[in-house]
Image: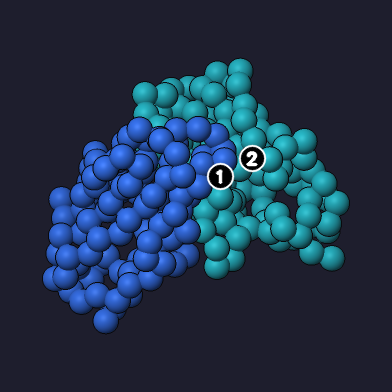
Chain colours: A blue, B cyan
Amino acid sequence: DIQMTQSPSSLSASVGDKVTITCRASQSITNYLNWYQQKPGNAPKLLIYAASSLQSGVPSRFSGSRSGTDFTLTISSLQPDDFATYYCQQSYYTPLTFGGGTKVEFK
Amino acid sequence: EVQLVESGGGLVQPGGSLRLSCVASGITFSDYWMHWVRQAPGKGPVWVSRIKTDGSYTTYADSVKGRFTIFRDNAKNTVYLQMNSLRAEDTAVYYCATNHASRADFENWGQGTLVTVSS
């Protein structure tokens, strides 16, 4: 199985901060990497697909990038609505696997 | 507007069975692979199973292989998950999710249905 190692597992930040979350795949997954946001009691919401494509309707402060097997989700200026848990997910090979999550909390 | 509505969850004893349903609207159902993803309380999402657009191909996580069956009825815009021989570790919220045939992500999700396996 492809392991997705996400870091950090949690972070504290303030409104307006730039936030970076990293996900490392245990083997090559080319660009088959997606990012989701989840708030308590809700289903995950797709933010970024294919490593760097912004899902329709998602604010442009969210962006994704790839360097080899390392992937990054960046929030350029954290907004109150962004406090949530973020997950990466590889769709290169089954079983499709998620990272362990990063909880973004208010500092 | 895309809507996915799951149903069929509930409390079941170990060894029991449940059938989950997910009805889709607002999409051309036959253009989408359908997936089930589960999330145990306080844990991250875990992919369970998927089915191809026409129902001709299915894949399962090892943890459910041989116990769960995914199938779909494109005429009813519905995907199902038949769960047999349920175990305590199957306790989770079960989500259905869509994956357009031209993409490789979970674009749309249902609200989830809770399955609790306990005596």
On residue B47, the disc is 1
On residue A47, the disc is none
Mark 1 burial class by Cα count in 10 Å: few <14, some 14-19, many 20+: many
**Percent coordinates x, y for residue B63 in the rendering:** 70, 45
Quadrant where the C terminus of chain A sits is bottom left
* Chain containing mark 1: B
Q: Residue at x 26, y 42 (%)?
A: A67
Quadrant where the N terminus of chain A sits is top right
Spatial distance from mark 1 to mark 2, Cα to Cα? 7 Å
**Percent coordinates x, y for residue B53 in the rendering:** 51, 22
Label pair 1/2, CB-CB below 8 angstroms: yes
Kindly identify the amino acid type of the residue bearing the numbered disc 2: Ala
**Percent coordinates x, y for residue B38 in the rendering:** 58, 51
Left or right of B7 on screen, residue A105: left
Sooner in the amino-acid sequence: mark 1 or mark 2 = 1
Q: Residue at x 63, y 58 (%)?
A: B92
Mark 2 burial class by Cα count in 10 Å: few <14, some 14-19, many 20+: some
Q: Which residue is drawn at 48% across and 22% down?
A: B30
Question: Is disc 2 placed on a helix, strand or loop?
Answer: loop
Q: Residue at x 42, y 24 (%)?
A: B101
Residue B20 falls in which quadrant of the image? top right
- Is residue A59 in sight in this rendering? no
* Chain containing mark 2: B
**Percent coordinates x, y for residue B21 in the rendering:** 62, 41
On residue B61, the disc is 2
Q: Which of A97 and B92 is in front in this view?
A: A97
Kindly identify the amino acid type of the residue bearing the numbered disc 1: Trp
Question: Is disc 1 placed on a helix, strand or loop?
Answer: strand
The answer to whether residue A39 is above or below residue A25 is: below
